[in-house]
């Protein structure tokens, strides 16, 4: 199994209170206490991962990441790769088990590697449906698992068989491409904004949803980090797309901690994520 190698960014942020009394941030320099790696130690945006090129040992682009397939608890199980075509036109799509990719996050950028040729990857089982429903089919998933296990040799194939549960069919597969952009409502049906991005922890699990709140056409918009465990995704969508819900009132969301700017660097402030968990009444993982 390929292990994920995450690079720790030594960074910190000094918390300051803005005019509204909400917590904002100012960049400074520090290190994680005792050099320990926190589960949430970098800003790993799913939006930028979905644009990452997949390179082989010869540094050739053999595919690109187009989507992630997650379980409702936020765990990434597969990456959807676009193969062939020109600028996405005529491309085919396959799902590779997440642990078969070498995914690293270095200096704020994603690096994705797969030791295959482009021609070899084009022989992988491909999706025929637009909604990736094959991922719920046991026979198709077995073909995918066996294909990528065999690319890494007999020893890797044996290990894959021993850990086959990680590649079993998904009964509920959330597509990151649809979650990002989903409207957020509370239990009363009131609009609270929309999901602008998802942030992964170092275990490749969605840790936070970033909610765009207020503003007009994205101008003056505020960003609220919400623990993923607080967000519920409805399988049915309204006329505008997928809908997410949260058990919070509009007044509560108005008082939620904010991140400043679309880099979301505030999330790395000492104690900031603890504050977010406390505000939303969620135990820290």
Image (cartoon, helix red, strand yellow):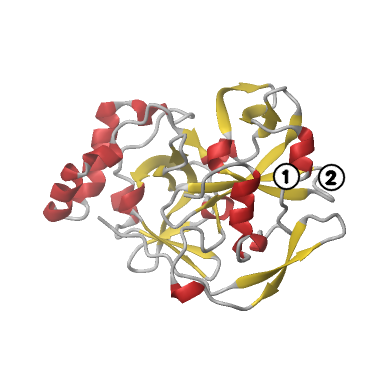
Q: Residue 109: image x %, image y %?
A: 53, 65
Callout 2: few (<14), some (14-19), or many (20+) C-alpha neighbours within 10 Å? few
Disc 1, disc 2: CB below 8 Å? yes
Alpha carbon of mark 1 to alpha carbon of mark 2: how far?
9 Å
Q: Indicate the quadrant where residue 21 lies.
A: bottom right
Tally of numbered tags: 2
Q: Secondary structure at mark 2?
A: loop
Could you tell whether 204 is left or right of 219 in the image?
left
**Outermost residue, bottom direction?**
29
Q: Residue 69: image x %, image y %?
A: 44, 39
Q: Nearer the viewer, residue 112 or 206?
A: 206
Q: Is residue 256 above or below residue 234?
A: below
The residue depicted at 32 percent of the width and 26 percent of the height is 137
Q: Secondary structure at mark 1?
A: strand
Q: Nearer the viewer, residue 129 or 73?
A: 73
Which label number is shown at residue 215?
2
Could you tell whether 3 is left or right of 161 in the image?
right
Which label number is shown at residue 212?
1
Q: Residue 72: image x %, image y %?
A: 47, 34
Q: Residue 279: image x %, image y %?
A: 66, 46
Q: Nearer the viewer, residue 167 or 151?
A: 167
């Amino acid at each position: 199994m390929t292990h994920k190698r995450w690079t720790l960014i030594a960074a910190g942020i000094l918390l300051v209170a803005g005019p509204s009394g909400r917590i904002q941030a100012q960049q400074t320099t520090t290190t994680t206490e005792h050099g320990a790696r926190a589960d949430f130690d970098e800003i790993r945006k799913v939006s930028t991962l979905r644009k990452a090129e997949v390179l082989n040992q010869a540094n050739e682009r053999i595919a690109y990441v187009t989507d992630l397939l997650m379980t409702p608890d936020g765990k990434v199980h597969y990456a959807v790769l676009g193969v062939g075509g020109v600028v996405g036109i005529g491309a085919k799509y396959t799902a590779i088990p997440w642990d078969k990719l070498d995914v690293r996050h270095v200096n704020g950028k994603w690096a994705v590697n797969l030791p295959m040729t482009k021609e070899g990857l084009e022989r992988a089982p491909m999706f025929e449906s637009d909604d990736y429903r094959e991922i719920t089919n046991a026979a198709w998933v077995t073909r995918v698992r066996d294909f990528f296990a065999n690319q890494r040799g007999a020893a890797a194939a044996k290990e894959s068989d021993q850990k086959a549960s990680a590649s079993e069919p998904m009964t509920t597969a959330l597509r990151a491409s649809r979650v990002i952009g989903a409207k957020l409502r509370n239990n009363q049906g009131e609009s609270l904004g929309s999901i602008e991005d998802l942030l992964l922890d170092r275990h490749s699990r969605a840790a936070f949803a970033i909610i765009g709140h207020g503003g007009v056409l994205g101008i003056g918009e505020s960003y609220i980090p919400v623990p993923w465990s607080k967000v519920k995704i409805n399988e049915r969508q309204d006329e505008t797309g997928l809908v997410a819900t949260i058990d919070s009132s509009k007044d509560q969301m108005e008082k939620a901690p904010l991140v400043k700017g679309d880099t979301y660097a505030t999330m790395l402030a000492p104690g900031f994520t603890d504050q977010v968990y406390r505000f939303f009444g969620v135990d820290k993982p």
